[in-house]
Image (cartoon, rainbow, N blue to C red):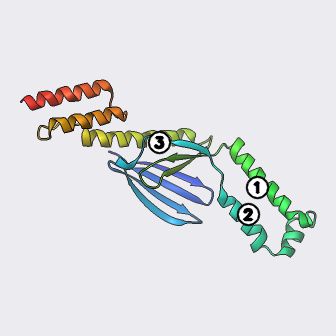
Amino acid sequence: MEIKRLKQRFFLGSNTLEISDKELRIDSRDFISGNRERIIPLSEIKKCSEKSTSFSIKLMIVFCFAFYWMIPDVIFKNILFLGVFGDFGVIYLFILTLLYILVSRYIIKEKEIIIPTTEEPIVLYSNKYTQEKVDSFINEIFQASDNFFKNAYGIPDKNLPFETQCQNFHWLKINGIITASDYENLVNNLTALKRK
């Protein structure tokens, strides 16, 4: 299987996701939490996703840090705001933050897509420009996970107990990995294989 890759850039960081035969590799580079690599087996990925509107708390931290702790009070009042805002710097910061939220939520339509796993969830970022590409990659993750389970539990084997294999096939059917007709075909193939 060829390795499929998705690169994402977001505020103060980036993610690179790669799908292989048995695992999903995530390389995260983030200004706040640093570099991190995760390897998630395809068997641990749950076949569902949840979309929520992204709100970047990192932006709030940077705004607060830059405007109130790094820039001296004299520069903050006199040079940046040309003395116009004076003591209304807090209001100005609030307006800037509100403007960012409105732009990211209603114009760019940033979304955070969460795919649950048995441990820490996979987080992908999407907006109206990257939505098709991200949705396609999510489908590839789910397809790779399905293929992993089909190869692990959906192949009739003469040496394994009949009941165990039927339970595995049934589990595949219940979880939507195979259809009802695929289930019937696998049971029929297993029955014919056991008769030989």
Image coordinates of residue 107 in percent, x first then y, are 71, 42
- Name which residue lies at 71% across and 60% down: 60
Q: Mark number for residue 137? A: none
Quarter of the image for residue 129 reads top right
Q: Is residue 179 above or below residue 87?
A: above
Residue sitting nearer the eye, 52 or 2: 52
- Name which residue lies at 54% across and 42% down: 50
Residue highlighted by disc 2: 63
Image coordinates of residue 191 in percent, x first then y, are 14, 28
State the separation of the CA atoms marked 1 and 2.
8 Å
- 5 lies left or right of 186: right
Quarter of the image for residue 159 reads top left
Image coordinates of residue 189 in percent, x first then y, are 17, 28
Mark 1 touching mark 2, by CB under 8 A?
yes
User: What is the secondary structure assignment of the residue under circle 2?
Assistant: helix
User: What is the secondary structure assignment of the residue under circle 3?
Assistant: helix
Of mark 1 and mark 3, the one earlier in the sequence is 1
Q: Residues within 10 Å of mark 2 (few under 14, many from 20)?
A: some
Residue type (three-letter) at the residue carrying disc 2: Phe
Residue sitting nearer the eye, 181 or 71: 181
